[in-house]
Image (cartoon, helix red, strand yellow):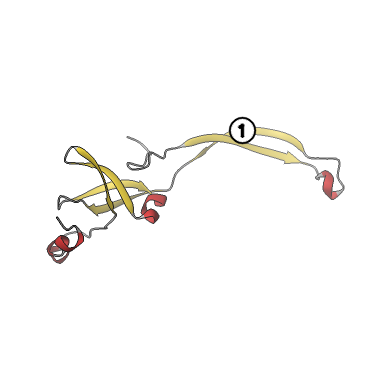
Amino acid sequence: MGRECQVSGKKTSFGNHKTERGKAKYLGGVGKKTTGISRRTFKPNLQWIRVWLPNGTTTQVRVATSVIRSGQLTLEVDGKVQTFPLIKASKGSAEARANLKNLYPI
């Protein structure tokens, strides 16, 4: 799958890096001159997180930090696409599993 968010679909995008010399006209110079243009990449800030799913299981997903800040996940669970609140799960937390019914009332 590569470097791609599993929720928002954000992935590496491409652009240019522009190198200039000179002094801007509004500062009293004769203007900026472009001395080079090279390709560059813009990479999304992706993180692996472990989350609770509405069916009571946990899974690891690779998501952009913008998705983590939003607090909502839209994933395919049990064959259908669902939107649910992002609840992080710690490894082997039996106490959190017991409280899961309070998080997802069915």
Residue annotated with mark 1: 38
Quarter of the image where the C terminus is located: bottom left
Q: Which residue: 41% across, 40% down? A: 10
Q: Which residue: 25% across, 48% down? A: 60
In-front residue for pair 15/98: 98
| Residue 103 placement: quadrant | bottom left
In-front residue for pair 35/81: 81
Binning the other alpha carbons within 10 Å of mark 1 as few (below 14), some (14 to 19) or many (20 upward) gives few
Q: Which residue: 87% across, 48% down? A: 28
In-front residue for pair 93/86: 86
Please say if 10 is above or below 70.
above
Q: Is 91 placed left or right of 13 in the picture?
A: left
Q: Name the residue furthest bottom.
A: 95
Q: Which residue: 14% across, 61% down? A: 101
Tag 1 secondary structure: strand
Where residue 14 sits in the image (x, y, percent)?
Answer: 52, 34
Where residue 77 sits in the image (x, y, percent)?
Answer: 20, 42
Q: Is 74 placed left or right of 77 in the picture?
A: right
Q: Tag 1: residue type?
A: Ser
Where residue 55 sits in the image (x, y, percent)?
Answer: 15, 50
